[in-house]
């Protein structure tokens, strides 16, 4: 900054001349630098750059000549110059201004140009000019305080002529009366535009250097044959090859692929750029990377003289794309799985016999299953989703009950569980449900679940009967225990009577052999007693009594054995368990079948749950007796047959219970072990016996149970029990 010591005309001319000389030296330096930069460029590009620089130099020379001509009339020009001048005293008051100063301020709306204080003027102005003058005011204060001031940066100002760029320079004034500072307000719009154009010209002249400096992508400059002339640093970083290594060689030699990717030369000849598809290349160190290349051309009148390739490492994008495709595939697979699971869940919910529904916080149905729809008496294709209860159009017993339970849950936030309700079913029969209404966490609304417990009444009756039978069984076991002792001594006494009576018979025979004359009274007594009848009947009666007592003893022992449940898994005599169980079940089969036992004496002891095994055998014997009964009378009036056999193999014991009853078809055999499945009439079978047998033998004993049967040929159930049991299974 040139300091202004006085405002005389000669001093101002001197300052202006010095400024022009400095500007000319700067221009010469810029032109020389541009010439040096273009010296290494190709001929056509250098010529174009030189022409642009020459034109610029001519323009600058013309401007200089105009400045020299203006020196002669400088005093007259000061007042008409483009810059506004404002002289300030030590307090910031405006001492003097030139004609341009108020003209420039007048171009901005709301500016009071006759304000005597520059500081006040700066404070009153709005954005734009106000920012510029306030920065100038700060610089003025520094100058007035004796500190060096910095140039004010250019500010954007909205004027009546449109947006302009203005600048203020503050220069100290020394030795000139009251003047202490000079403000030079200039319109820099043209200069800025000229500077921008100059920058564009320089950028065009040194495009390779700018590309190398500003682009992260690799840039390759090649001749018309594709031989490399220049590469930037990004190319070296990406490929590992320096300019010295690649200069004069074809770019395709460094792709590392065989053959190199093809591109459309015809398209380039036609004037289009070519974008090569992504391809895999290899760096100098062997590293593989994905490359995307765009080919451009620099054309003169003779055609393509240069080719420019902009290459980008797209390895991360390719990997990301592959990851995206893999993630998309996983997402699609997951969506498919979720769709399948949703369909399965929907199917499961629809197949559940319990009533299931859910509602939102406004009481609208969010969904339900088929059981809920059927109980409400709705059509098979009815869908309540999105509808409140009042739009369902069904007046049943369940609606008011659900409304009351839902209101309670929404009011208290606590679930209602197992609320017993009885409603009239679609057919008019009463149905019982255990309704539970739960709050939906987070989503609001309720979830309703109703378990149909109508059949539980029958199950409760059966359970009561089972408990009653269990009590009777326990009582029978106690009675058997009590009967056993008197039966024992009655048997002993009867055996004693039988033995004693045999001796009496010997005595009576001896007495009858004596002559009547020897003892007439004894002879007459023997005639009155009818000794022959007694001799014939009493032995028979005693024999039958002993057989009856033995039979009672067997029944008592069988009842005691059967009623003994055992203690966990223990070694059990299988043959004895079969014998005692068949005796207990005698009343079931003795009127319809003859039961025969074919027991292998070598079966021995087998580790099992004694009570459960006896129950399984009992169920199978009872089922066999019922099957024989259902087959009807035999030809000739005979009874059916039930055969129980036991066999021992190397690793298992087999119990076989066969009958010649009705048999069963394939469909029945496939469902015979399903819970609640029965072929018996209502009230005679519960469908639990074989299900319990399967659960006990297979799941608890670790064995197997199967059936061999055909219609009209009877059935044989075969139980296999393992002889050896793993320690963890015990």
Image (tube, rainbow, N blue to C red):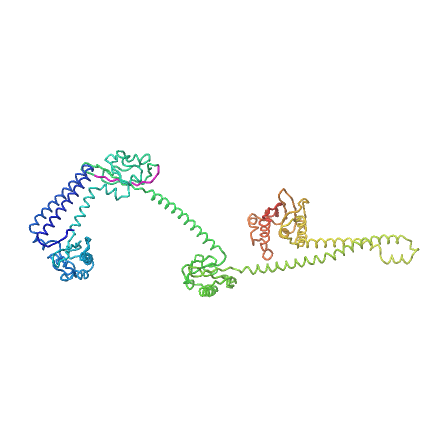
Q: Which region of the structure is painted magenta?
A: 286-298
Q: Residue at x 76, y 56 (%)?
A: 489
Question: Looking at the image, which is closer to me, 270 or 219?
Answer: 219
- Main SS of residues in magenta: strand
Quick check: 368 left or right of 616?
A: left
Give the farthest residue toward the right: 517
Residue 291 on the magenta span? yes
Counting from the top left corner in percent of width and height, residue 216 is at: 28, 43
Residue 621 on the magenta span? no
Quick check: 304 left or right of 463?
A: left
Quick check: 438 left or right of 111?
A: right
Q: Residue at x 12, y 47 (%)?
A: 20
Counting from the top left corner in percent of width and height, residue 393 is at: 43, 63
Counting from the top left corner in percent of width and height, residue 647 is at: 65, 44
Residue 283, by quadrant, is top left
Counting from the top left corner in percent of width and height, residue 600 is at: 67, 45
Q: Disc count in the image? A: 0
Question: Looking at the image, which is closer to me, 582 or 654?
Answer: 654
Quick check: 323 left or right of 419?
A: left
Q: Can residue 665 be seen from the camera position used here?
A: yes
Q: Can residue 629 be seen from the camera position used here?
A: no
Residue 443, by quadrant, is bottom left
Question: Looking at the image, which is closer to me, 58 or 69?
Answer: 69
Question: Looking at the image, which is closer to me, 362 or 154?
Answer: 154
Give the farthest residue toward the front: 175
Q: Is residue 45 above or below residue 426?
A: above
């Amino acid at each position: 900054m040139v300091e202004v010591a006085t405002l005389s005309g000669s001093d101002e001319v001197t300052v202006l001349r010095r400024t022009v000389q400095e500007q000319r030296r700067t221009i010469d330096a810029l032109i020389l630098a541009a010439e040096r930069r273009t010296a290494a460029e190709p001929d056509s590009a250098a010529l174009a750059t030189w022409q642009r620089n020459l034109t610029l130099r001519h323009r600058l020379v013309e401007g200089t000549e105009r400045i020299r001509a203006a020196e002669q009339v400088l005093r007259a020009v000061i007042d008409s110059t483009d810059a506004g001048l404002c002289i300030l005293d030590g307090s910031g008051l405006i001492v003097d201004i030139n004609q341009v100063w108020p003209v420039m301020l007048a171009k901005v709306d709301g500016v009071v140009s006759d304000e005597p204080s520059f500081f006040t003027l700066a404070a009153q102005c709005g954005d734009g000019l106000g920012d510029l003058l306030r920065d100038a005011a700060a610089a003025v204060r520094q100058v007035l305080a004796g500190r060096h001031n910095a140039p004010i940066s250019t500010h954007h100002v909205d004027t009546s002529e449109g947006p302009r760029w203005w600048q203020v320079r503050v220069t100290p004034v020394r030795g000139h009366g009251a003047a202490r500072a000079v403000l030079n307000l200039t319109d820099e719009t043209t200069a800025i535009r000229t500077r921008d154009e100059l920058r564009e010209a320089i950028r065009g002249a040194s495009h390779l250097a700018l590309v190398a400096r500003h682009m992260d992508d690799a840039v390759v400059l090649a001749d018309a044959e594709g031989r490399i002339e220049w590469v930037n640093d990004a190319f070296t970083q990406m490929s590992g090859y320096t300019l010295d290594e690649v200069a004069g060689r074809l770019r395709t030699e460094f792709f590392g692929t065989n053959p190199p990717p093809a591109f459309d030369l015809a398209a380039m000849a036609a004037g289009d750029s070519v974008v090569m598809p992504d391809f895999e290349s290899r760096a100098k160190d062997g590293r593989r990377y994905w490359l995307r290349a765009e080919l451009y051309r620099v054309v003169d009148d003779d055609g393509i003289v240069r080719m420019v390739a902009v290459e980008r490492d797209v390895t991360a994008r390719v990997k990301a794309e592959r990851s995206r495709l893999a993630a998309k595939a996983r997402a699609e697979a997951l969506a498919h799985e979720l769709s399948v699971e949703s369909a399965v869940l929907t199917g499961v919910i629809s197949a559940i016999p319990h009533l299931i529904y859910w509602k939102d916080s406004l009481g609208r149905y969010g969904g339900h299953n088929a059981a809920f729809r059927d109980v409400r008496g709705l059509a098979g294709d009815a869908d309540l989703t999105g509808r409140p209860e009042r739009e369902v159009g069904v007046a049943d017993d369940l609606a008011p009950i659900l409304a009351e339970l839902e209101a309670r849950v929404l009011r208290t936030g606590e679930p209602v569980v197992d609320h017993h309700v009885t409603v009239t079913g679609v057919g008019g029969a009463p149905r019982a449900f255990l309704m539970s209404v739960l709050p939906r966490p987070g989503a609001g609304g309720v979830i309703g679940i109703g378990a149909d417990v109508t059949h539980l009444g029958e199950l409760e009756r059966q359970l009561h009967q089972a408990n009653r039978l269990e009590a009777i069984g326990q009582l029978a076991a106690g009675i058997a225990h009590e009967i056993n002792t008197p039966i024992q001594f009655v048997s002993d006494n009867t055996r004693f009577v039988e033995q004693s009576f045999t001796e009496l018979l010997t005595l009576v025979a001896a007495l009858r052999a004596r002559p009547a004359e020897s003892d007439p009274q004894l002879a007459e007594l023997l005639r009155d007693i009818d000794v022959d009848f007694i001799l014939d009947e009493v032995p028979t009666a005693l024999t039958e009594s002993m057989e009856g007592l033995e039979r009672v003893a067997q029944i008592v022992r069988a009842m005691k054995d059967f009623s003994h449940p055992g203690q966990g898994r223990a070694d059990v005599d299988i043959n004895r368990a079969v014998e005692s169980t068949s005796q207990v079940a005698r009343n079931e089969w003795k009127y319809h079948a003859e039961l025969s036992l074919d027991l292998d004496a070598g079966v021995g002891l087998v580790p099992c749950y004694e009570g459960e095994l006896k129950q399984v055998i009992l169920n199978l014997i009872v089922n066999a007796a019922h099957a024989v009964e259902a087959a009807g009378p035999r030809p000739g009036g005979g009874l059916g047959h039930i055969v129980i056999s036991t066999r021992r193999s190397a690793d298992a014991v087999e119990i076989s219970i066969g009958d010649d009853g009705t048999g069963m078809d394939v469909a029945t055999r496939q469902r015979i072990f399903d819970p609640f499945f029965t072929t018996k009439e209502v009230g005679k079978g519960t469908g639990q016996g074989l299900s319990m047998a399967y659960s006990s033998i297979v799941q608890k004993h670790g064995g197997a149970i199967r059936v061999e049967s055909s219609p009209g040929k009877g059935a044989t159930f075969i139980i296999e029990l393992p002889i050896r049991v793993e320690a963890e299974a015990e």
